Image (spheres, rainbow, N blue to C red):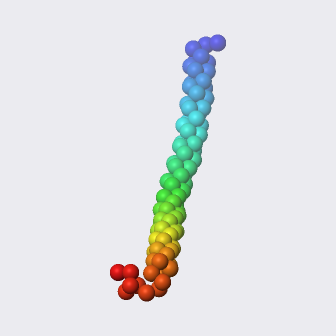
């Protein structure tokens, strides 16, 4: 093989290598875009989860507050009925 043939072979090899590198770079770019899309979706999902969890927390807080208020009202009612029986329903007599 003469020098010209060797140069053409080397050029062909370099061309194939360059094309392979470009294809790999494009594939990496596509994978990177997939990762960016997934991270954006994850961020949106995290924001939605945060809002939902705050709403659930508020619902349970109010449910808990309502339970404590009902318990306090029940204790007050029991104390009032107990005092009523002890005073024979004449509260002026007891105090």
Residue at 38% x, 81% y is 94
Q: Image height check: is 82 above or below 27?
A: below
Q: Image height check: is 93 above or below 20?
A: below
Residue at 43% x, 87% y is 90
Residue 66 in sight here = no
Q: Is residue 85 left or right of residue 19?
A: left
Residue at 48% x, 71% y is 75
Residue at the outermost left position: 95
* Image x and y of residue 22, in percent: 55, 36
User: Of residues 58 and 70, which is closer to you in this image?
Assistant: 70
Residue at the outermost right position: 1
Residue at 64% x, 12% y is 1
Q: Image height check: is 49 above or below 72?
A: above
* Image x and y of residue 58, in percent: 48, 66
* Image x and y of residue 3, in percent: 57, 14
User: Of residues 40 and 69, which is closer to you in this image?
Assistant: 69
Residue at the outermost top position: 1
* Image x and y of residue 73, in percent: 48, 75
Residue 72 in sight here = yes
Q: Image height check: is 56 above or below 14?
A: below
Q: Quadrant of the C terminus?
A: bottom left
User: Of residues 68 and 14, which is closer to you in this image?
Assistant: 68
Q: In this view, does 66 lie to the left or right of 8?
A: left
């Amino acid at each position: 093989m003469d020098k010209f043939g060797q140069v053409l072979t080397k050029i062909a090899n370099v061309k194939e290598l360059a094309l392979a590198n470009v294809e790999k770079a494009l594939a990496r770019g596509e994978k990177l875009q997939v990762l960016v899309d997934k991270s954006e979706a994850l961020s949106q999902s995290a924001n939605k989860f945060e809002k939902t969890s705050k709403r659930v927390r508020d619902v349970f807080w109010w449910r808990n507050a309502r339970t404590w208020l009902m318990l306090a009202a029940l204790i007050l009612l029991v104390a009032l009925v107990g005092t009523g029986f002890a005073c024979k329903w004449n509260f002026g007599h007891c105090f």
